[in-house]
Amino acid sequence: MKHALALDLALHHGFWGDTAAPLRAVAAEPDRLARAGIVLKSSGPRALLALPDDSPAPDRIALDILTTEPRLAGLTQGWDAAAVPVIEVPADATTVAFPPDPGASLPRAPGDARLCRLLVAPRPADPRLRLICQPVQALWAYHVTGQAAAGPIRVVDPARTCTFEDLGTEPLPDGRAARVLRSTRPLPLAARSDLRLRLELDQPAPYDPLALVSVLPAGGTNLRPAPDGQPPGILQSDIFICLW
């Protein structure tokens, strides 16, 4: 029996960037596909679906997108612990975004590893389709300790894509005081962030600012609800910097 390629699905996640995301596609109704002679081959974050030449194509094929790493749930914007979104993909779409617009969903049982369900029409003319997942965003809060933390320090983004505010000092659990410099808006988390932030100390004129840390570590996955009256759902990633 001859088959023709009808779907070439690639799964991407902003946290993992260009590296392979821990996602894979499986048939939601494998018996139905088998009876129709439809073949689904899945390898990591890519899946190929082929239809037999001598059978009519179904209107929709249901594919479940599974997570293969437990922490992905906490790193994906729009993950719903109670529901699995069902996304009906337009026939002419080349990309699908997650999280989707509000719509149909399935109940999520404990241990359910599904990110979402895609309803896809076979597309032999142009089988390429990408699912792009957005990473969680959080306020990046640098907690700076050491003698220099009392000076005129600041976090600088040379690309000018984000800014930071000085929240003053806060006590750490061990009793030390930390200067807190936090982003003014949530920033996306990534395994390898493109942001190249630095910590500077302003000096009296005519001297240029002194770079205390040339490349600061990016926000990590140690997330908590943002304190001090931030809107519900805003997260904060705490990053600790020790100076001399």
Image: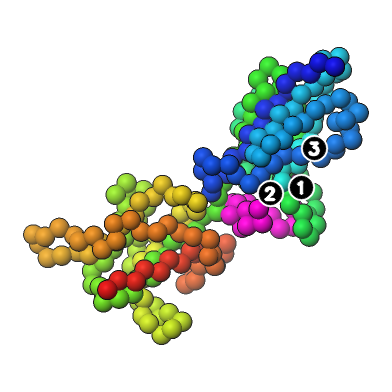
Q: For this view, does 54 lie left or right of residue 167? A: right
Q: Which is nearer the eye, 61 or 231? A: 61
Question: How much space separates mark 2 and mark 1, taking CA atoms?
Answer: 17 Å
The residue labelled by disc 3 is: 27
Binning the other alpha carbons within 10 Å of mark 1 as few (below 14), some (14 to 19) or many (20 upward) gives some
Tell me what residue is drawn at x 46 percent, y 67 percent: 238
Residue 83 falls inside the magenta stretch = yes
Q: Which is nearer the eye, 16 or 137? A: 16
Q: Quadrant of the N terminus?
A: top right
Tag in front: 2 or 1? 2
Tell me what residue is drawn at x 36 percent, y 68 percent: 241
In terms of image quadrants, where is residue 61? top right
Is residue 120 shown above or below 13?
above
**Mark sitting on residue 105:** 1
Q: Quadrant of the C terminus?
A: bottom left
Tell me what residue is drawn at x 69 percent, y 36 percent: 43
Q: For this view, does 166 lie left or right of residue 124? A: left
Choose the circle earlier in sequence order: 3 or 2.
3
Q: Position of residue 64 (x, y in %)?
A: 75, 42
Q: Position of residue 51 (x, y in %)?
A: 80, 22
In terms of image quadrants, where is residue 166? bottom left
Q: For this view, does 208 lie left or right of residue 44? A: left
Give the tally of numbered discs.
3
Q: Amino acid at mark 3?
A: Ala
Q: Amino acid at mark 2?
A: Thr
Tell me what residue is drawn at x 75 percent, y 18 percent: 4
Question: How much space separates mark 3 and mark 2, taking CA atoms?
Answer: 14 Å
The residue labelled by disc 2 is: 67
The range drawn in magenta is 69-90
